[in-house]
Amino acid sequence: MTTSPDTALRSPAVAPALALGPAATQRIRLRRALRGNPMLAIGSALVALSVALMIVGPWLAPFDPQSVVGVPSTPPPAALDWPRLVWTSLTGAARPPHWFGTDASGMDVFSRVVAAPRTDVAIALTATVSSFALGVALGLVAGYFRNPATELLMRASDLVQSFPVFISGMILVALAGRNVGNIVVALALLYAPIYLRLTRAEVLSQRHRGYVEAARALGNREIVVAFRHVLPNALAPAIIQSSVTIGFAILMTAGLSFVGAGVRPPTPEWGLMIAVGANDIVQGEWWPSVFPGLAISLTVFGYAAFGNGLERVYGR
Amino acid sequence: MSTGAFVLRRLGVSTLQLLALALAVFFLIRALPADPVARLVGQNPTPEAYASAKRSIGLDEPVTTQLGRYLGVASGSSGILQGDLGRSWVSGAPVGKEIRDALPITIELVTIAFALAFLLSVPIGMMCAVKPGGAADRSAFAYSLFAGSQPEFWWGLLFVYVFFSVLNVVPPPLGRLDPMLTPPPSVTGFITIDSILAGRWDALADGLQHLALPVLTKVFVLSGPIIKMVRQNMVRVLQSDFVLYARAAGLPPTRIARYALRSALAPAIALFGALYGYILGGAVVIETIFSLGGIGQYAVRSILSFDYPAIQATILVITAISLFVYLLLDIVHAVVDPRVTH
């Protein structure tokens, strides 16, 4: 996006690598892509961290993230004490402290922050995969087969896109029931039209290419041509978009619980933690809301940076 | 096509779109498994109390009758076709009036934030485009990527902590005006404009102080995508033939920049419309943090209390405004760039 895109991959320095095997080439390509593209490197690291925490986060939590484990509103230990505290808790000489303090009800903020990706990131990933699958399939059909039915599909997609996203998300989740499954469904429905539109546009630009004609001339059925030949060539815009969607889905999941239309307490969830901490920040108790907010901030930035890096690798 | 015909056609399409939206919302909220009657009568009601509450809000009637009354096609009732948005099930007040009170607060916030973000981002975006890949461009790019992906409710709280709790330079985040202050007489509903009309400089100053942090938060988040957009368009225009010609003809750089800005902003106008609609619908969290009492907070209240008439009206009004702004900017676009109407 900045300067000329894709230089990392097309530079003459990469050419000798083509003589190597495909695996080696890929490794070199990846290294080049990361070196010429710091955003992709930062993004990949943050994305990997968020996915890792989604899997192992709850096991890393030193305290039960869903129960009262300490004195309410305990501030985090002073920064100077951290090295000593890290040492004593690693060697088992003392119980681990409340690294990020405790919230107004006495739950451990650190445990909740590292356990929350199991909610936030899992919701965002599932919702994105669902909207990707739904939107790409419908977009392929709408772009490849052009008839009154697909025209109707486009109008329906326009209609969904004319809804204010956040308020529609609140309505879907609050009225269907505030649980994880409904949040996933709501986000998937609201984000699907983006993929539909991107994929349809790409299919429209592909459908008259020579390879499509060739596949058809070989006697393939239309549906086979569409799904086996056109689809793989029309995926790039949707793939680039998906990283951004995951970030937005995390923001939306957190935002929904912040206004009271998302998951219920005491689920460890970043937006909910910020909402609980919001009441205390006016009195100067910053830690219950600052740490979960920092987690959202870094995670969503990570997905945005990763998406931006992908965009440059794909040369768009 | 003349501009007049273009506007008429767009108005027609927008009206149809709104009607489709109204129907979609009407059926959607009734298809979802929520029980608004239970919300009204509370826990463990007698069957009689439940039935009478259900009757009082008209949910005992068949859906077609409800729809007829909502639209205003049933005899003896007025509905959205007559401009009547119904009565709130929670407060009993006409929804139209409640929205008229809340809406100016949101529009004021969003418009001020949007204008400031725009004024700030356009020069930055231009500066980046003049030297792509330079230090200024790279830092502005990192900023826009970062700011465009931030949880605004968290930044709002951080600003409250820094500017109210620690520095104490702004009023507490508890409303649009100091509760001890008599608000200026309502003429337009916009506190800023009403205070100026009434010559109430104390209310103007207080109102602006209360707006400072919400606007700061919005500008911080919004300027990201705007910088990115202006920069991209500007880079493209600066590489175009007419700029090359202007350079070759020896025009001064400021004049070239002015020409380039005009053709860089024209295609972005439609995008600004979409962005305005987006932040109007996204004012929910920021209003919640600062208790501003705008349409976003009204939406939260209606949705969490299953107040169907209020939910339907809120979505309809927000979408209508975004479509209107969109249309307005399209007309501006058509005037700036006549190719659009052809």
Image (cartoon, coloured by chain):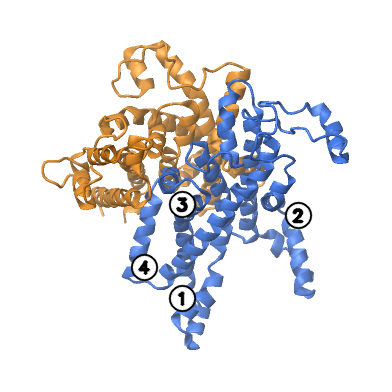
Chain colours: A blue, B orange
Q: From this view, report whether residue A9 is shown above or below residue A219.
A: above
Q: Label 3 belongs to which residue?
A: A186
Q: Position of residue A94 (x, y in %)?
A: 85, 34
Please, which chain is the residue tagged with disc 3 on? A
> What residue would you read off at disc 4?
A150
Marks 1 and 3 on same chain: yes
Is disc 2 placed on a helix, strand or loop?
helix
Using residue B18 as the reference point, say whether residue A42 is left or right of it. Answer: right
Q: Which residue is mark 1?
A: A208
In the image, what residue type sits under mark 1? His
Q: Residue at x 66, y 34 (%)?
A: A68
| Nearer-N-terminus badge (3/4) | 4
Checking the image for residue A35, the label placed there is 2
Q: Amino acid at mark 2?
A: Arg
Query: Label 4 neighbourhood size at 10 Å, few (<14), some (14-19), many (20+)?
Result: some
**Of the two numbered discs 2 and 4 in the rendering, the one whose residue sits closer to the viewer:** 4
Split into 4 quadrants, where in the image is the C terminus of chain A?
bottom right
Q: Amino acid at mark 4?
A: Thr
At x 56% / y 42%, what residue is drawn? B148
Give x and y (percent) for residue A145. Answer: 40, 73
Foreground mark, 3 or 4, reads 3
Indicate which disc, 4 or 1, sits on the residue closer to the N terminus. Answer: 4
> Which residue is more in the foreground, A43 or B305?
B305
Tell me which corner region of the image, top left, top right, bottom left or bottom right, holds residue A204.
Answer: bottom left
Residue nearer the viewer, A104 or A10: A104
Q: Nearer the viewer, mark 1 or mark 3?
A: 3
In this view, the mark in front (4 or 1):
4
Alpha-carbon distance for marks 3 and 4?
Answer: 23 Å
How far apart are the two marked residues, 2 and 4, measured between alpha carbons? 44 Å
